[in-house]
């Protein structure tokens, strides 16, 4: 009897945790991402990479510091995925604005590519949020290649490579898009 009561209380606490933590987790992720991005001594590519890594820590944290139940089952729920996608949009919108005003202010083509890929990401996220019954299909039709292209442009910035021919730049972006689509397709369709 005592074990059943303890188990029931624990389950209620976990349900409360699930409903309270996504906004707190998103706020923490956004704040940490901003703090990481604003640290001047690191190259831009290192800062972008660290912010990208923040996306994967919430379901992989040590239990003593975890803000969510870290089970694969919870991390696959619509509630978690919804909060995660909204948080991703907030973090990457911040990165987009900061890099367009800063590192990529000189390159109109890079700006257009990043804005276009971010808009592509927004469309995919909105469709996922509006039609959750189709779930992972949206991740394969609208793969998040914004991060990889932002990282590529950041490496070019760090290496001070500015005069990349537009055809070459677009070619590399196309290869990154194709590779990301293949990865997303194999990852998400294998789970359907």
Image (cartoon, rainbow, N blue to C red):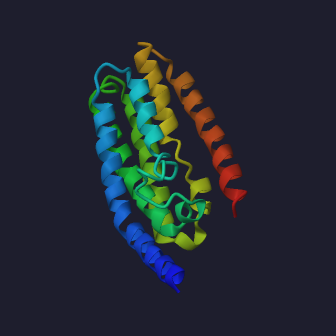
Q: Nearer the viewer, residue 17 or 96?
A: 17
Q: Residue at x 36, y 29 (%)?
A: 108
Q: Position of residue 174 (x, y in %)?
A: 59, 35
Q: Nearer the viewer, residue 81 or 137?
A: 81
The part of the image, by quadrant, that contains residue 172 is: top right
Q: Could one spot residue 97 in this view of the protein?
A: no
Q: Is residue 15 above or below residue 161?
A: below
Q: Is residue 169 above or below residue 97?
A: above
Q: Position of residue 100 (x, y in %)?
A: 31, 33
Q: Nearer the viewer, residue 127 or 30?
A: 30
Relative to 129, 100 lies left or right: left
Relative to 127, 51 lies left or right: left
Q: Is residue 49 above or below residue 70?
A: above
The part of the image, by quadrant, that contains residue 12 is: bottom left
Q: Nearer the viewer, residue 14 or 158?
A: 14
Q: Residue at x 46, y 39 (%)?
A: 52
Q: Could one spot residue 93 in this view of the protein?
A: yes
Q: Is residue 88 above or below residue 154?
A: below
Q: Residue at x 50, y 82 (%)?
A: 2
Q: Position of residue 87 (x, y in %)?
A: 38, 54
Q: Residue at x 43, y 51 (%)?
A: 64
């Amino acid at each position: 009897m005592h074990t059943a009561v303890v188990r029931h209380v624990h389950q209620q606490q976990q349900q409360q945790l699930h409903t309270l933590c996504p906004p707190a987790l998103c706020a923490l992720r956004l704040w940490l991402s901003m703090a990481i991005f604003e640290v001047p001594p690191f190259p831009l590519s290192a800062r972008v990479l660290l912010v990208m890594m923040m996306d994967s820590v919430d379901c992989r944290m040590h239990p003593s510091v975890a803000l969510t139940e870290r089970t694969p089952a919870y991390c696959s729920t619509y509630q978690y995925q919804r909060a995660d996608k909204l948080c991703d949009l907030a973090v990457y919108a911040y990165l987009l604005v900061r890099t367009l005003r800063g590192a990529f202010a000189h390159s109109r083509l890079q700006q257009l590519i990043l804005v276009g890929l971010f808009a592509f990401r927004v469309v995919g996220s909105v469709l996922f949020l509006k039609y959750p019954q189709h779930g992972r299909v949206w991740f394969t039709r609208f793969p998040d290649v914004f991060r990889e292209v932002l990282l590529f442009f950041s490496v070019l910035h760090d290496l001070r490579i500015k005069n990349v021919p537009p055809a070459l730049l677009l070619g590399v972006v196309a290869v990154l898009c194709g590779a990301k689509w293949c990865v997303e397709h194999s990852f998400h369709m294998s789970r359907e």
